[in-house]
Amino acid sequence: NGQPALGANAGTAPLDRVRADDSGRVLTTNQGVPVGDNQNSLKAGLRGYTLMEDFILREKITHFDHERIPERVVHARGSAAHGYFECYKEQSDLTRASLFAKAGKRTPVFVRFSTVAGERGSTDTARDVRGFAVKFYTDEGNWDLVGNNMPVFFIQDAMKFPDLVHAVKPEPHNGIPQAASAHDTFWDFASLMPEITHMLMWAMSDRAIPRSYRTMQGFGVHTFRLVNAEGKSVFCKFHWSPMAGTHSLVWDEAVKISGADSDFHRRDLWEAIEAGAYPEWELALQVFTEEQAEAFEFDVLDPTKLIPEEMVPLTPVGKMVLNRNPDNFFAETEQVAFCTAHIVPGIDFSNDPLLQGRIHSYVDTQISRLGGANFHEIPINSPIAPLHNNQRDGMHRQAINRGRVAYEPNSLAGGAPFQAGGRGFNSFPQAADGDKVRGKPEKFAEHYGQARLFFISQTPPEQDHIVNAFRFELTKVQTVAIRKRIVAMLRNVDETLAQRVADGLGLALPPAMPTLDLVPIPDYAPAPSLSLTHR
Ligand code: HEM
């Protein structure tokens, strides 16, 4: 078919084609020329000029000079492993996704866990959200479930993501802080964005300092759709639960470990797998209908809300086992490209405005991070499902496509790729009608109810940890008005929480923030004076 057999990532054998083992072999150049001397450059006399002619030296240095690629704009620090997903029971009434087709069916996976804010070399045990990204190499193409270890998110709309990340990342003038959230820009943004409140409660809780990647939950966060072979659809949220239980560090442990071993989580995952203590997670579906969704007091398209399990129970559908470490960190962990747009027949999107923006963002960033449009050919990214299309050329193209036809329809190549019709991926025909507007649905405006539920669901020691986290983080914030706005926000979550945080900061309790979302927040953020002329 002209495509190289790059695929097959999960089993060991299919990757053999691209595996390289150099040990004990004769050293060569990139052109396969045996190298006579790898110790000394070529000179005009032993103490003379190094010669331009030395193609061996130049090739060695040139390749070295280009060894680094840009790190991910978020989630730069991560660790990954191979494994499989095993389906418990056929789910064809809910979805035609092939990984759920049969009890006992195994689908290869590659999973990358990450922190969000820190740079590639930052510490593992920082207070942060953790990424939980799973690539399923299904036999109908790759499905990426690109989730986090918390079930909700900071913002409701993709439009705010660059602002969120600019606020979270190290401050641009001094590059501080590298991996933690304790700084003015983050808390300034948070204090002016009440929709962040629920996620803040999770981020200040023990969930933000997991004991191990092996003891973290994972969540798809957004509402997705499942679609069965008859074209019937239900809504679904995805939940991963670690078989080893969910465990966190306490802050003092996290701080101490961070100093003693900043690779703590990376080492733990690696060593567990090397020792044969394979980590396992159970995947559960939280399935509900559009009619149910309409009755909820929150909007299922709002990613700052979860669906309480008392309202919609979880159905376990399979387990994931991670049983093999990567051969090469760069080739696999660094070059893997997860993307929310990677869905397969049987799975579809909802209109969650955060998810809709993500569908664009990942491929876009990977085109620059991984150098052009052909990164799907990098072995870790290529599907085990057959790949045939009319794409051609581009930087670093690997496939040697044969024949003269790269278009469709055509009459010159009877065997050219043709569309699969009903057997292929077809978007769920959801009704779409409405005025072209910017804005939020009404139910998106309430931000405190679930934040309160989360706080009161915590045990007293866990509540103490949340209070202490807010105190610690906010004492690092130098602008007093920001500290006050956060306490004003917390008054809408829980008065004792607000009081305890205020006491820790030596603040008098400020008036509560308005409970409905109006931006700019009256009394808290002065409206900027607008001017259309440049200074
Ligand atoms: C990584 C964008 C929200 C989970 C990334 C990357 C970008 C990005 C550009 C780097 C990708 C790469 O270089 O390969 C966005 C945007 C969002 C958003 C625009 C909102 C509009 C979220 C949410 C979640 C999430 C809600 C969790 C549900 C992840 C994970 C990674 C990631 C796990 C790391 C994937 C890996 O391990 O390689 N995101 N993100 N992101 N994002 Fe998001």
Image (cartoon, grey):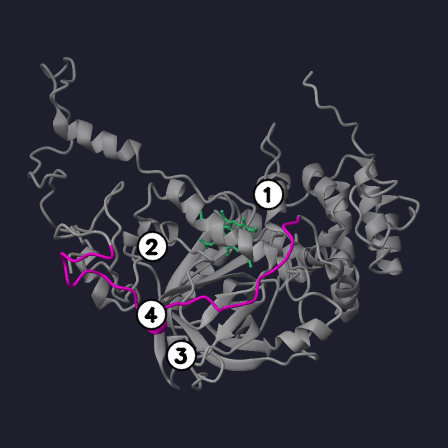
Pointer 4 with pointer 2, Cβ within 8 A = no
- Point out the image quarter for the C terminus: top right
Q: Is residue 349 magenta?
A: no
Q: Earlier in the sequence, mark 3 or mark 1?
A: 3
Q: Amino acid at mark 3?
A: Glu
- Reading the image, the residue beneath label 1 is 165
x and y percent of residue 382 in the render? 30, 58
The residues colored magenta run 408-437
The tag earlier along the polypeptide, 2 or 3, is 3
Which residue is denoted by mark 2 in the rendering?
Answer: 332
Q: Is residue 23 above or below residue 236?
A: above
Outermost front residue:
411
Which residue is at 63% across, 41% downward?
163
Kindly identify which residue carries mark 3.
Answer: 86
Residue position for label 4: 421
Q: Residue at x 11, y 40 (%)?
A: 28
- Report which quarter residue 187 is drawn in: top right
Q: Amino acid at mark 4?
A: Gly
Of the image marks 3 and 4, the number of the one nearer the N terminus = 3
